[in-house]
Every structure is written in C-alpha cells, then in structure tokens.
Image: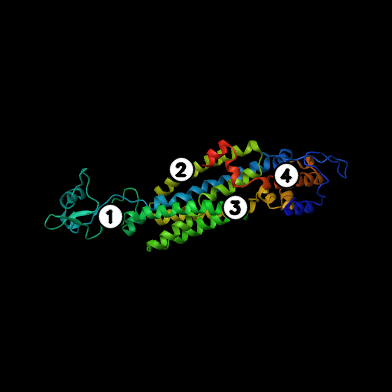
Amino acid sequence: MSVRSVKAAATLGIKVGNLSPNKEKNGASGNKYKTCEDLDDILDIVGGQGKFQKRFLYLILSPLTAMEPLLGLNLLFMLYEPNHWCKVPGRETSGLSLEAWKNMTIPRESDGDFSKCTMYNENHTAVTCTSGWEYDLKDYDHTIPLDFDWVCDKSQWATWVLTANALGNALGTIGLGQAADKIGRKPVFIITLVLNIFGRIASLYVVHSFWAFLLFAVITGLGFPMIYIAPAMIGAEFSGKEFRAWIYSWTWMIWVVGMASLPWIAYLARDWYIIGLATTIPCALAFICCKWVPESPRWLLSIGKVDKVAEIIKNIAKINGTEDKLTDQELNSMLKQVVIKQDQCDQKLNVFTLFSKKRLAKNTL
C-alpha cells in the first residue's frame, strides 16, 4: 500500500488492514460500516442530485456559464472590419453624392464592387490609397480595424490576433488542464477569471501597439475554454451519475443564452472599447461567486485530503437533508475504502492503458 493511502487512513483514525473494501464491519456504535467502491456510493446515500447540487447548478454555475462566452468571444466583434474605400479629398466641396463621388474616384473590382484599397489619381490611374480610408458606419461607429486602419496591407492583423487568441486557447487547455489535476479545479477557475478579466481590460489600453495587443490576445486566450470546464467539472464531481449529464446539458443551453446576448451588446454599444468594457467588467462579479464554489471532493480525495472531503460530504448531507443517513464513523470507513481502492487502481493505470482496448485505443488516436 502506498504512503498516500496510509496517511489518508491515519487521518481517518482507522487501522489499515482491519477493514476489507468488500466486507462490512461492526463499528463502535454497533452499526455496520457500509461498503464502498467509489465516491458515487457515498453520494448515493447523502444525495447526488439533491438541493445542494441543484442550488449550485442553477444559482452559481448558470450565471457563471452565461458570462463565459462574453469573455471568450467579445474579440470577434471588436475586430470587425467594416466595408471601406480610399478617402479622396474634395468630396465635401464637390456637391456630389457619395455614390457619384465613388464612381468618379474609386475603381471597381472584377466582381463589380468598388475597390477597397485603390483610387484614381489625377491621371485617372489606379493607385493605392494616399489619404487614408473612409468606412461604412452602418453597423459600428468604432472597431479596432476602423480606428487603427487595420485594412488593406494590414488587413491580416485582425486574423493574426484571432490566431494568437486561438493559440492561447490550445496552450491553456493543455497547461491549465494539467494544473487542474495538480493544484485543484477551483484555483484553476480563479486563474482563468484573472486571465480573461484583467487581461482583456489591460489589452484595451495597448491597442495602439499591435505586438502588445497580440501578446495580450495569447494571455487572455489561455483562460478559455478552461473557464467553462473547471466549474462544470466541480459540479459534476460532487454529483451523482444521473445528474452529471444534466449539468453539462443545462450549462450548454445557458452558454447559448450568453452567446446570443453578445451580438445585442455589440449592436447597442457600436464601439469596440465599450464592447470590451461591457462584456468584461460585469463579469468581475464572478469573483464573488467563488466563495460558494467548493473544491472537487474527487480531486481532494485523489491527493489524500480526506478530512476536507468529509467536510464537503457532511455539508452536502446537511443541505440535502440526509444527515441521518450516514454517521461520521460510517463516512470515515467508506472514505478509507475509496482511498484504498483508488490507490490500487492508480498502481495499475499508466499511459499504455489508453491503448489497452480496441475502442479505447481508437478514441485515443
């Protein structure tokens, strides 16, 4: 037996070897200790889909999920490139309409549309824009490409920023995914909030420097999509088997609600800076919700912090009204069995387990 199992059992105050995971033993009170193979067995007793789980899902996880697409997708609207054409001085005094002026000063492309990046000079020869651009303000008054002329020879800059953000997504999913197993789900969730909220706000003030803005795109990207995965994982890991599927189904529906609200915010704001603030600052309220986000009992159990797991299980039982279903002695006995069983499984599992069966190997590949 590993040192971790011995320490966990010692924490519970029960001698290792006196209790088989597959048998029952009379406790000091005369009650039989319940056998246990997994944390699910304990949740079946205290309630795996009771008031505690539903309160967390509907009151904590739902608002957190609704705000996550605002943080993760607001960049798409801030980087919108409106229709544009070369600015040719003189229209104000010409008395011509915009359409007539463009017919006279802007060449047409092969598809019949006005050119976005060329104009006629005094010799009626097509040349690149010499006096900047004019923009169609139908949808937005200000976007980053509009205000900083990320068009024509700089039109790829917005693509680079989105690519950098996607690169951050990939790195964050791998790095923070590993961190969630090392330092816990809740700390990782707090890290993603810091990256998304403070990173996005800071980026709004460095847009004039393309490379600084590109760097912040990577930084904020690190926190997405783990900002959704971490709290949903916590909810699933203290819920019963039947309730886990509903947690992910419900949160994805709430995600759609949050995502559908983002275009309305952009429509009303019409300004990249306001969009950035309006989709970020209110989300700082999520730090308040962290007070009611517990750590995953499964993760705590995996690192041998059985006393903290016992506290969470007791709190679940208290809120679910099942305190009378499990004594402290029974809970300690069952948790000890889970630790021993988990340790036995850990010794058998390694990376090659991913290829131990045909279907598992196929999914891994």
Q: Secondary structure at mark 3?
A: helix
Residue 132 lies, in percent from the top left, at 25, 59
Task: Specify whether residue 41 is in view.
Answer: yes
Q: CA distance from mark 3 to mark 4?
A: 22 Å
The residue nearer to you, when weighing 347 against 76, is: 347
Q: Position of residue 177 (x, y in %)?
A: 56, 51
Disc 4 element: helix
Q: Is residue 290 left or right of residue 318?
A: left
Disc 1 crowd rating (10 Å Cα; few below 14, some 14-19, many 20+) is: some
Structural distance between the alpha carbons of marks 2 and 1: 31 Å
Residue named by callout 4: 341
Which residue is identified by label 3? Answer: 180
* Snapshot quadrant of residue 54: top right
Where is residue 144 shown, x and y percent of the image?
Answer: 36, 56
Answer with mark 2 or mark 1, whichever residue precedes in sequence: 1
Identify the amino acid type marked 4: Lys
User: Mark 4 or mark 2: which comes first in sequence?
Assistant: 2
- Which residue is painted at 79% across and 45% down in the image? 333
Q: Amino acid at mark 2?
A: Ala
The percent position of residue 211, horizontal first and vertical second, equals: 39, 62
